[in-house]
Image (cartoon, rainbow, N blue to C red):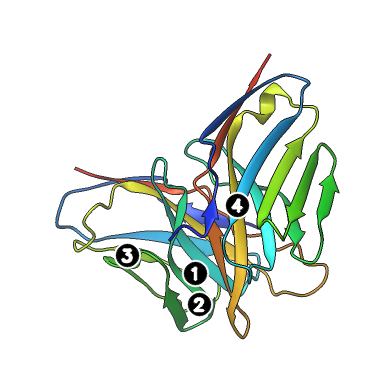
Amino acid sequence: DGGITQSPKYLFRKEGQNVTLSCEQNLNHDAMYWYRQDPGQGLRLIYYSQIVNDFQKGDIAEGYSVSREKKESFPLTVTSAQKNPTAFYLCASSIRREPPYTGELFFGEGSRLTVL
Amino acid sequence: DQQVKQNSPSLSVQEGRISILNCDYTNSMFDYFLWYKKYPAEGPTFLISISSIKDKNEDGRFTVFLNKSAKHLSLHIVPSQPGDSAVYFCAASVTIGSGTYKYIFGTGTRLKVLA
């Protein structure tokens, strides 16, 4: 089945450590996105990428880094510079805007990162 | 600057009645508006969307209405079912470059459908 796979689902990290969250999609989508969800704050955009080897900062990119070496993969690294990394992280992808287009953003199941 | 706002954090509705979830936006350049349903510790599930050139879109029990002059959209669920209990997010997309789109989400409304 086609979809977006995020791993790990749960991750614990000590302060000062970097951690990388994996996101893989087999939907042949060009665009991929990373969001962070905190209680009461909805989903906030961290980084996004429209094509391979290109990505842009979202609204809360500080303390995060990404790469897009393959169309299928968009890993997110949470660095020690991120002040409040404990959150639920969601990866998403979207198709080209060709008819019939619904505007849909497809999501993975998420990864919960807890910093101890 | 919150471009997409959901001002009601929660809503309770009796089973069988109509649920109306509201969303306001500020950016007139948004071209698609979407509604997602989310359970804790899971990814959001797409429900329905509407293009900015339309004012209504219907899919089964779900109808989305768009009022561009008021920069307001709403999701109607009729009839509401206990399984509809979840957090609902409103989202909007905007084109920010050739083939580049950005999606902005509201803070969500928790719907509880009472049996």
Relative to residue B65, is residue A57 drawn left or right? left
- Badge 4 and badge 3 in a common chain: no
What residue sits right under mark 3 in the picture? A77
- Nearer to us of marks 1 and 4 is 4
Is residue A25 something one can see in this rendering? no
What residue sits right under mark 1 in the picture? A73
Mark 2: few, some, or many residues within 10 Å (few <14, many ≥20)? few
Q: Position of residue A35 (x, y in %)?
A: 45, 58
- Badge 1 and badge 4 in a common chain: no
Please tell me whether mark 3 sits on a helix, a strand or a loop.
strand
Q: Earlier in the sequence, mark 2 or mark 3?
A: 2
Mark 3: few, some, or many residues within 10 Å (few <14, many ≥20)? some
Q: Position of residue A105 (x, y in %)?
A: 63, 60
Q: Which chain is indicated by disc 1?
A: A
- Badge 2 and badge 3 in a common chain: yes
Q: Which chain is indicated by disc 2?
A: A
Q: Amino acid at mark 1?
A: Ser
Q: Which chain is indicated by disc 3?
A: A
What residue sits right under mark 4 in the picture? B24
Mark 4: few, some, or many residues within 10 Å (few <14, many ≥20)? many
Residue at figure coordinates x 67%, y 52% from the top left: B72
Q: Nearer the viewer, residue A10 or A78?
A: A78
Relative to residue A59, is residue B72 drawn left or right? right
Q: CA distance from mark 2 to mark 3?
A: 16 Å
Mark 2–mark 1 contact, CB under 8 Å? yes
